[in-house]
Image: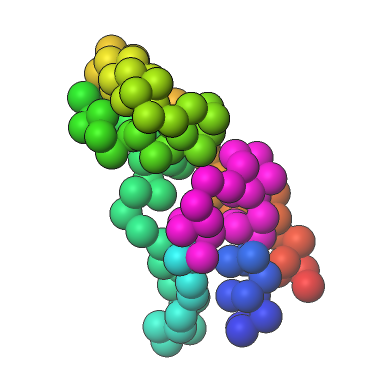
Amino acid sequence: MHRIGIEFTEALKDKLTKDHGKDTGKLQSSITYRFQGNHIIISMPDYAEYLEFGSPPHFPPPKELEGWVSRKWGVSGKEAEQAAWILARHISKYGTRPYPFIRQTISEDLPKILRG
């Protein structure tokens, strides 16, 4: 059972990094597993749901996007502030697109892990 938990959480982390890159690594490092009876419970932060399924249009605080914009787009200072506002407006109109790393890992990797 521990082998399955370890391999599945590693597969989730690999899929997330391979398909969607790594920003801060916070999500990857927070994916864990534990046992509850005969079940393996996989845990990760709530915001993984928004990565998995995307989000509906909403206006995120541009200040909270500045770090991401700086890291991903290579801008800083005033340029990062402006880019964060542009991104926030885009999200307010279109939402965010899904990156289904959980569902893909379940369908592609879990059967192989279970066969072991």
Rendered view: 12 above or below 49: below
Query: Is residue 46 visible in this depiction of the protein?
Result: yes
Q: Main secondary structure of the magenta part?
A: helix
The answer to which of 25 and 9 lies nearer the viewer is: 25
Tell me if residue 85 is in the magenta stretch: no
| Residue drawn at 46 percent across, 80 percent down | 34
| Count of numbered circles on the image | 0
Q: Residue at x 46, y 56 (%)?
A: 27
Give left or right: position of 56 versus 68. left
Measured as percent of width and height from the top left, residue 107 is found at 64, 48
Residue 23 drawn in magenta = yes
Relative depth, front residue between 51 and 112: 51
Q: In which quadrant of the rendered view does residue 84 lie?
A: top left
Task: State the image coordinates of residue 35 (x, y, percent, origin top left).
Answer: 46, 83
Q: Quadrant of the C terminus?
A: bottom right
Quadrant of the image occupied by residue 58: top left
Tell me: residue 90, above or below residue 9. above
Q: Which residues are magenta?
A: 11-29
